[in-house]
Amino acid sequence: MARAAKHEELRRALLAEMSGSAPHTPLPTEREISARHGVSRNTVRQALDALEAAGSVYRVQGAGTFIAPAVVSKSLTLTSFSEDMRARELEPASRLLAAETVRAGQQLAERLGIAPEAEVVRVSRLRLADGSPMCLENVHFPADRVPGLTEEDLGGSLYTLLAERYRLEIRSAEQIVRAVDLGDTEAALLGVPLGSSGLRVERVGRDRRDAPVEATTTLYRADRYDIRFTVRRAQS
Amino acid sequence: MARAAKHEELRRALLAEMSGSAPHTPLPTEREISARHGVSRNTVRQALDALEAAGSVYRVQGAGTFIAPAVVSKSLTLTSFSEDMRARELEPASRLLAAETVRAGQQLAERLGIAPEAEVVRVSRLRLADGSPMCLENVHFPADRVPGLTEEDLGGSLYTLLAERYRLEIRSAEQIVRAVDLGDTEAALLGVPLGSSGLRVERVGRDRRDAPVEATTTLYRADRYDIRFTVRRAQS
DNA sequence: TCCTCACATTGGTTGGTACCTATACGGGCC
DNA sequence: GGCCCGTATAGGTACCAACCAATGTGAGGA
């Protein structure tokens, strides 16, 4: 390891230095950080850019860079269910419901950018947090990208399995969030009353070349789950 | 105008040049763009950084920069209801339900970072898209930041009013999204069947100094509204 | 024919420098 | 005492230059 770029190391260092301080505390000036850490101001700015994008600091021209107030929600990042639950201090677990190879069909084919006749591997799991149901997860992969997946241990993190076994890394994902009325089987599996509402998240995960790798539909219990994120004003 | 920074102008220029081309078409190399537009490579990279963050292009080291596939969802940005609806090609409108000054109370005080006894202005509106109800919106401002707001015309864009009348600009916002069962009055106002589910978005808007400016709770119809966004893998 | 490896090319990182613009603070004027 | 404005200082923009690291290709060997 230790292959990290300087601006990345600096980012971590600054994050560590900041960790104890109160919100709105000013950081040293860019020029001072530059001098103290023995890097160029360019590198400092790169690190600060990342911290700003993550919502850890805010900058005011002419005034300085300041520690952002502790936010409920970190900026929106792509996380696996396991990571998501651990961030909420819940213990993630899984119950495999189905793992099979089927035809893609029209809708999935479109989301994954493959032919409707192509085969996909479907993994259906009930995800638990601290032992009780949190969501129903339906993941689809193009079959030719994950040969032998149905024989693997699907109880843990799929992301880890994908990365280690198939060298597939999901770098970005598009998500569509909707509120839905749960069906009876869904409500039963999730252990909520019939007629409850739920949060449906449809996701298409892409590798660093923007090729679709995964299409997932997840149904969350409305009473235990929310989505938190920070948005910023952008230019047109 | 024309006060735009070079990297910003370049970004727009590149976006325009790209607009016709097919996905995965490579852009000119950074060095070539630099030469052709008469700017430094640093500036080119700044422009490309923005385009990449917006999801318009993706970059592969050693290979090039490519036009990203047309995505359903642009990267997540902060938009007003009016902008949001226009992006969906719907005509936004408003019906004012209430505009009053009240005590903040515990919960609002916490969200806005003010004292519970402090006064807040509450603006409650039914938002319409193409003439039919889309959501119920409840906006709260610290009263001392928007004197005389209740006397203004509250039928249009609050963001515009805030910017022009009070010089308040919302630069970032934290949002919490949940699925909820609508209450009877809410369902009636939104014109959906009793017992329908809805999407509740709680937002705290902040100015560029990260000071809370507004706290909004919005209740969307589940059948007409979804939230779309792109997430990226981030470092720890 | 197929595989391998060196190399040219592309984006990624880092350094350095200069100048612009917004901000805050303090001294001086009213 | 309070307002105004100059000035020091902060971040923002832009340029140049050099080198690193991943990629892909084509020449050459098995």
Image (tube, coloured by chain):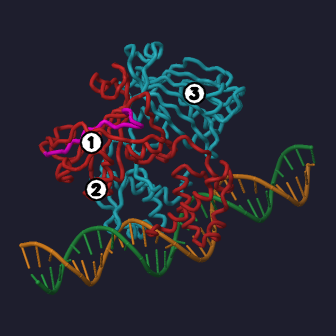
Chain colours: A cyan, B red, C green, D orange
**Residue B99 is one of the magenta-drawn residues:** no
Whether callout 2 and callout 1 share a subunit is answered yes
User: Crowding at label 3, few (<14), some or many (≥20) Cα neighbours within 10 Å?
Assistant: many
Q: Which residue is mark 3?
A: A139
Q: Which residues are magenta?
A: B118-133
Residue A38 showing in the rendered view: no
Q: Relative to B146, is A37 above or below?
A: below
| Residue C1 x %, y % | 92, 43
Left of B233 or right of it: where is B138? left
| Residue A23 x %, y % | 28, 53
Q: Relative to B19, is B104 above or below?
A: above
Q: If the image is split into quadrants, where does the N terminus of chain B sit?
A: bottom left
How far is disc 1 from disc 3 in space, using C-alphas? 38 Å
Q: Amino acid at mark 3?
A: Val
Q: Relative to B36, is B105 above or below?
A: above
Query: How many numbered markers are drawn?
Result: 3
| Residue D12 x %, y % | 42, 66
Image quarter of residue A142: top right
Residue closest to the eye, A216 or A31: A216
Left of A18 or right of it: where is B43? right
Q: Which residue is mark 2?
A: B168
Looking at the rendered image, the disc whose residue lies closer to the viewer, 2 or 3, is 2
**Residue B129 is one of the magenta-drawn residues:** yes
